Amino acid sequence: MEITTERVTMQVNGSPMGGFLARPTTGGPYPGILVFMEIFGVNSHIRDVTQRVAREGYVALAIDYYHRTAPGMELGYTQEDIEKGFAQAKQTTTEGLLADIKAGIDYLKSRKDVRGDRIGCIGFCFGGYVAYLAATLPDIKATASFYGGGIAAPPTPGGRPPIVDRTKDIKGFILCLFGTQDTSIPLDQVDKIENELKKHNVRHKVLRYDAGHGFFCDQRASYHAPSAQAAWEEVKAMFDRELRKS
């Protein structure tokens, strides 16, 4: 499907937040999908994913939730980049992320080429965490959360409680994808997420691939093509079922 892209700006409590929008050039209205970045900003990989989503027949929007501290920051995948990304992620708050997510939802719903009753999201790494948080909002009907670190991690002193505690608020479908070789997300945390989803009767699917963290990103050394392709087919089928056929 032929698409077009553009940079857009939304307002979050009176402050600008940048975004990267990809959409089909004709037709619609289409379901809308928010794309949540890794710790590395709305970089070339996240823009590529946003365009891939759009080519499937969605209006896709990647939002920059570093807009308060490092607007427009784009990083690669060196150790230095990882440290810079973690430093920015640690400055975010649950309240701020929720405000950013809601601003993205409102922007999509304001567009004539978007079906406002069919909004989904997809996120990777820290964005997988953000996607799980977004899934607790009533407007989100379908979620794909890739290797979201910290979803079920124990709270740190003075830190925010794990968002797995919010599982009961998820009303749509959620697809969670993890790597069994991911040293940053212990498998017992993955099990806890799945158990909480079952406990609260959330429609879900938890998949475990024989891969490491970041297996979907073809710019990272941990990229695992077979797992990435299988996961993408699962995501496409889920969005099609939940946002187009339901």
Image (cartoon, rainbow, N blue to C red):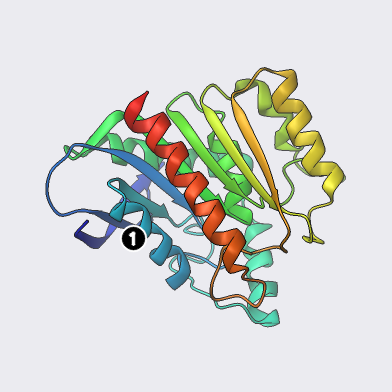
Residue in the foreground of this view, choosing between 241 and 23: 241
Residue occupying the far left of the picture:
26
Q: Position of residue 121 (x, y in %)?
A: 46, 42
Determine whether the residue tagged by mark 1 lies in a helix, strand or loop. helix
Q: Is residue 78 above or below residue 123?
A: below
| Res 230 quadrant in image | bottom right
Q: Residue at x 70, y 80 (%)?
A: 79
Q: Position of residue 80 (x, y in %)?
A: 68, 81
Total of numbered circles in the picture? 1
Q: Identity of the amino acid at label 1? A: Gln
Query: Tag 1: Cα neighbours inside 10 Å, few (<14), some, or many (≥20)?
Result: many
| Res 133 quadrant in image | top right
Quadrant (top left, top right, bottom left, bottom right) of the C terminus: top left
Q: Position of residue 49 (x, y in %)?
A: 42, 60
Quadrant (top left, top right, bottom left, bottom right) of the N terminus: bottom left
34 vs 134, left or right, is left
- Decide if residue 155 is in sight here: no
Q: Is residue 49 above or below residue 244?
A: below
Q: Residue at x 67, y 27 (%)?
A: 167
Residue in the foreground of this view, choosing between 213 and 9: 213
Q: Residue at x 66, y 17 (%)?
A: 201
127 vs 238, left or right, is right
- Decide if residue 1 is in sight here: yes
Q: Is residue 30 above or below residue 85?
A: above
Disc 1 designates what residue?
51
